[in-house]
Image (cartoon, grey):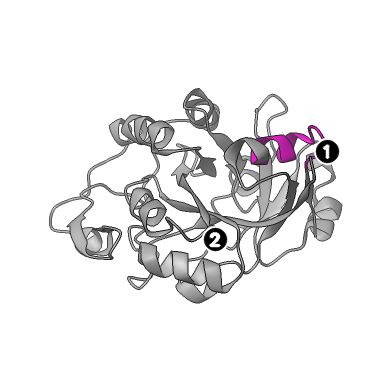
Amino acid sequence: MELRRFRADLHIHSCLSPCGELTVYPRRIVDRALEEGLDIIAVSDHNTAENAAAAIQAARGTGLLVLPGMELTSAEEVHILGIFESMAGALPAQDEVYRKLAMAPAHKTLIQDQVIVDKDDLVTGFSPRHLLAAADLDVRETVDLIHRHGGLAVASHIDREAFSIISQLGFIPPDLDLDALEISPLMTVSRARSAYPACGRFPMVRFSDAHRPEDIGRPSTDLLMAAPAFGEIRMALRKERGRSVRES
């Protein structure tokens, strides 16, 4: 089977993330991803996947693969991306996270910035949870949760000075079963390989961590695969059957 490159950005926030702009509605995410020539994206809001289904529906018929994701915050305040094949895996994972996550105080304006929308970008509600808070799950429990629901666990922006596994723990536990490490848009993979030689056993990817539409796809990661599919991404991260991550 012929392999070719597919461009992926698996770290995109929507208007449901309190730190995301309210203009980052699911349909706008899809439109921007297509403008940038992306083949695969994931909507990865903080501790929730409630806007992912709308983005999946908005992308139908476009050729763009949209995966549901979450950027989970562990008890140590480490950010871990969980990328799932479908909502069938993402929603049970989300339910577990919600049971470990605080509700936002009703008087806080934070709730007004956690907007749930449908595929036509119409507001359907607001999340009452404190989505930026740390869940009562340590790093190992967080990675295990993602894997139990069939997802891929990627340590977010490991080069950042806050909310990264290195900034919070000082190292990556040797027995932590991560699928990949993400580098922020501020660093290249080659520089990261030099700066973090102990991370050599992991594939490294670069995603946008977009919080506004214009950042989507800047940067992205090329994956050498047979098709834009979740199973193919898993094989690329594992370097199986010729699939691979094209680091840059």
- Residue 161 magenta-drawn? no
Against 209, residue 131 (above or below) is above
Q: Is residue 97 left or right of residue 79?
A: left
Circle 1 residues within 10 Å: few <14, some 14–19, many ≥20: some
Q: Where's the C terminus, which quadrant?
A: bottom right
Q: Amino acid at mark 2?
A: Asp
Against 81, residue 217 (above or below) is below
Q: Which type of secondary structure does the marked residue at label 2 adopt?
A: loop
Give the residue displayed 66% in from the left and 39% down from the top: 232
Horizontal and vertical percent position of residue 171? 70, 39
Q: Seen from this angle, which residue lies furthest bottom?
A: 214
Give the residue displayed 45% in from the left and 43% down from the top: 73
Q: Is residue 3 left or right of residue 234?
A: right
Point out the stretch of residues depicted in magenta.
233-243
- Mark 1 vs 2: CB contact within 8 A: no
Q: Is residue 111 left or right of residue 21?
A: left
Please tell me whether mark 1 or mark 2 is closer to you in this view: 1
Q: Earlier in the sequence, mark 1 or mark 2?
A: 2
Horizontal and vertical percent position of residue 88? 39, 32
Instruction: Decide which of 70, 234 is in the foreground and name it.
Output: 234
Q: Seen from this angle, which residue lies furthest left?
A: 107
Q: Where's the N terminus, which quadrant?
A: top right
Circle 2 residues within 10 Å: few <14, some 14–19, many ≥20: many
Horizontal and vertical percent position of residue 85? 50, 37
Q: Is residue 7 visible?
A: yes
Against 180, residue 13 (above or below) is below
Look at mark 1 in the image and give the residue it sits on.
242
Q: Amino acid at mark 1?
A: Gly
Instruction: Decide which of 38, 49 is in the foreground and name it.
Output: 38
- In space, the residues marked 1 and 2 are separated at their CA atoms by 28 Å
Look at mark 2 in the image and give the residue it sits on.
209
